[in-house]
Image: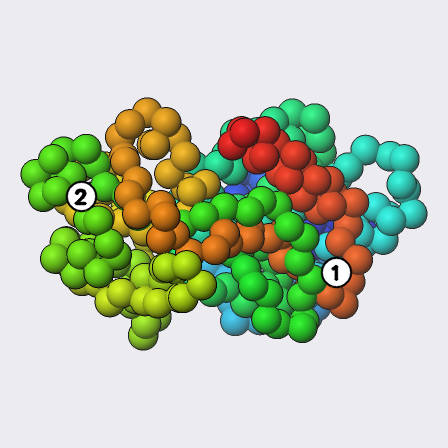
Amino acid sequence: MDRIELMQIYLDINDIGSLAGVARQRNIAPSAVTQALQQLEHLVGTNLIVRTTRRMSFTPEGEQFLEHCRFIVDEFENAIDHLNQQGPLRGTIRLTTTNDFGRMRLPGLIDAFLEQHPQVKVELHLSDGLVDLVAERFDFAIRTGPLVDSRFKARLLASQRRLVCASPRYWQKWGKPVHPRDLKEHNCLVLARPHSPQSEWHFVDGNRSFTVKVSGNRVANDGGALRQWAIRGAGVVLKSQIDVHDDLKAERLQSVLSEYTDKPINIYAVYPALHRPPRRVSALIDFITTHINIELA
């Protein structure tokens, strides 16, 4: 085996979690995976993995070497990708986005994309926190604007409003607010960000912008949990239109105060500015852009 293939097998061991699993996926003998690992350890001159009869773990050197291997393999695949413009898409795409958007919108789109491009692998990471794309080696993120970091470029995917929503049962019990300041009397479901709960909701009245400080008995760092609580009648939530589109259509949620809604928020695909995205990444961004707007039409 050449060194690139050895590193690919090493990365597979990390991703799959066992040498036997790698052998099954690659349809090779388990002894071939063991020999590849031994050959790699001989090349680097140290143990990379410690194995017992019950478990496997990476040594500190093995963990560090993983990051080097991932970088080298990614760059190798990118180089082939850029030179082979007419060939099939191949390689791994690492993508991060918010919990609710990722769960509600991306699985079906990724499935459809991979049906067209079977040699591509997608790693999806969901978090409502701000993820460092460079440090964690993501190809791109889907985020709401505006973009303030010059290290990145952005491509507009969609433009949506944030909506104040609750279930019909909640509005029937507590009444609908007629002005955003009335939200102070409601049980509002607040998104928690590190050291900064999102408890100030933004509105407009004509040309005037203002905020209302809300509160309630439920705070979560997962927008999907807040949406589920709202559907169950627990309170009022402020969500992107794209996140509650299906719930509004099915009348699980009802929106209010639309005349006071703040200006639309843009949803972007954000990627590092230093490198041109590989073809597979650009293709997935194109695919999401086209189909997300069709879904929401």
Q: Tell me the CA gap for discs 1 and 2.
A: 57 Å
Q: Quadrant of residue 231?
A: top left
Q: Amino acid at mark 2?
A: Lys
Q: Examine the rendering and report whether any part of residue 87 can be seen.
A: yes
Image disc number at residue 130: none
Report helix, strand or loop for mark 2.
Answer: loop
Q: Residues within 10 Å of mark 1 (few under 14, many from 20)?
A: some
Q: Position of residue 128 (x, y in %)?
A: 40, 57
In this view, the residue in front, 126 or 63, is 126
Q: Quadrant of residue 26?
A: top right
Q: Residue furthest left?
A: 173
254 in relation to 151, above or below: above
Q: Quadrant of residue 115?
A: top right
Report helix, strand or loop for mark 1.
Answer: helix
67 in relation to 33, above or below: below
Q: Residues within 10 Å of mark 2 (few under 14, many from 20)?
A: some
Q: Examine the rendering and report whether any part of residue 136 can be seen.
A: no
* Residue at point 61%, 72% (across, down): 149
Q: Amino acid at mark 1?
A: Ile
Q: Position of residue 77 (x, y in %)?
A: 79, 49
Q: Position of residue 81 (x, y in %)?
A: 83, 46
Quadrant containing the C terminus in the rendered view: top right
Q: Do the residues bearing badges 1 and 2 touch, measured as CB atoms within 8 Å? A: no
Report the number of numbered marks. Answer: 2
* Residue at point 21%, 49% (across, down): 178
Q: Position of residue 232 (x, y in %)?
A: 18, 37
Residue behind mark 1: 72
In this view, the residue in front, 33 or 255, is 255
Q: Earlier in the sequence, mark 1 or mark 2?
A: 1
Residue 89 is left or right of residue 108, and the answer is right
Image disc number at residue 176: 2
